[in-house]
């Protein structure tokens, strides 16, 4: 009778441990998904600013059609992208198109002095900072989740329960290169 009670107690402890471990992995995954949706929210804010920016530039530099079309095409690619890596690639393309747009604005002093353009540029800069912070938060949460599912003994349960390693939001190789400034 005592042996049966001990065996039942051990089984209950193991089951409670498994449930607790499973629940902690679910919570970590949910936190990572929330962090990823935070990136999406900031990116959508960015995407909403871009048509206004393009329209403002169009009034001053309408003949620079290809630059404006590239920005809109890159924005649409970002909206259609799914998954952290696809979004990152599309976002890198959009960043390059926006750099060209802002370089174009240097050729138009009236545009640079336009209050609406300046306000949109400031809003976009603020959103870029928010996106950077959201990506850093996501990467921290993803690292925590990955640690949780990869350490022993949790790794024994993670695979059978379908928990997979999350990818990090990474910076494109072009963005890692030094910016050249020449006078």
Image: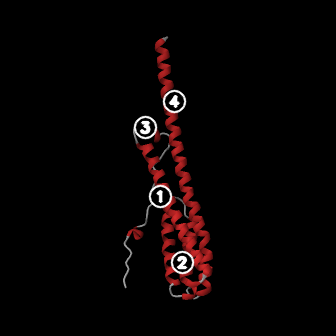
Kindly report the distance in space between the C-alpha atoms of the residues bearing marks 2 and 4: 56 Å
| Residue count near mark 3 (Cα–Cα under 10 Å), binned few <14, some 14–19, many ≥20 | few
Mark toward the start of the polypeptide (3 vs 2): 2
The vertical placement of 6 against 66, above or below, is: above
Q: Residue at x 36, y 83 (%)?
A: 182
Mark toward the start of the polypeptide (1 vs 4): 4
Tell me the tag on residue 156. Answer: 3
Of circles 1 and 4, the one toward us is: 1
Tell me the tag on residue 51. Answer: none
The residue that mark 4 highlights is 16
The residue that mark 1 highlights is 136
Q: Give the x, y percent position of residue 29.
A: 52, 47
Kindly report the distance in space between the C-alpha atoms of the residues bearing marks 2 and 1: 28 Å
Tell me the tag on residue 70. Answer: 2
Residue 56: name its quadrant.
bottom right
Mark toward the start of the polypeptide (4 vs 3): 4
Q: Which secondary structure, mark 2?
A: helix
Q: How many marks?
A: 4
């Amino acid at each position: 009778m005592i042996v049966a009670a001990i065996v039942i107690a051990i089984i209950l402890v193991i089951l409670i441990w498994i449930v607790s471990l499973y629940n902690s992995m679910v919570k970590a995954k949910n936190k990572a998904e929330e962090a990823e949706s935070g990136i999406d929210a900031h990116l959508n804010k960015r995407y909403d600013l871009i048509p206004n920016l393009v329209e403002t530039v169009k009034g001053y530099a309408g003949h620079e059609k290809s630059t404006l079309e590239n920005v809109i095409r890159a924005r649409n690619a970002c909206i259609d992208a799914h998954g952290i890596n696809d979004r990152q690639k599309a976002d890198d393309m959009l960043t390059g198109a926006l750099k060209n747009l802002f370089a174009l604005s240097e050729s138009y002093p009236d545009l640079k002095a336009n209050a609406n353009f300046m306000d949109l540029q400031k809003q976009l800069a603020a959103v870029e900072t928010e996106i950077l912070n959201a990506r850093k938060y996501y990467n921290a949460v993803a690292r925590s989740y990955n640690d949780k599912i990869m350490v022993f003994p949790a790794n024994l349960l993670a695979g059978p329960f379908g928990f997979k390693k999350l990818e990090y939001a990474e910076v494109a190789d072009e963005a890692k290169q030094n910016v050249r400034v020449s006078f």
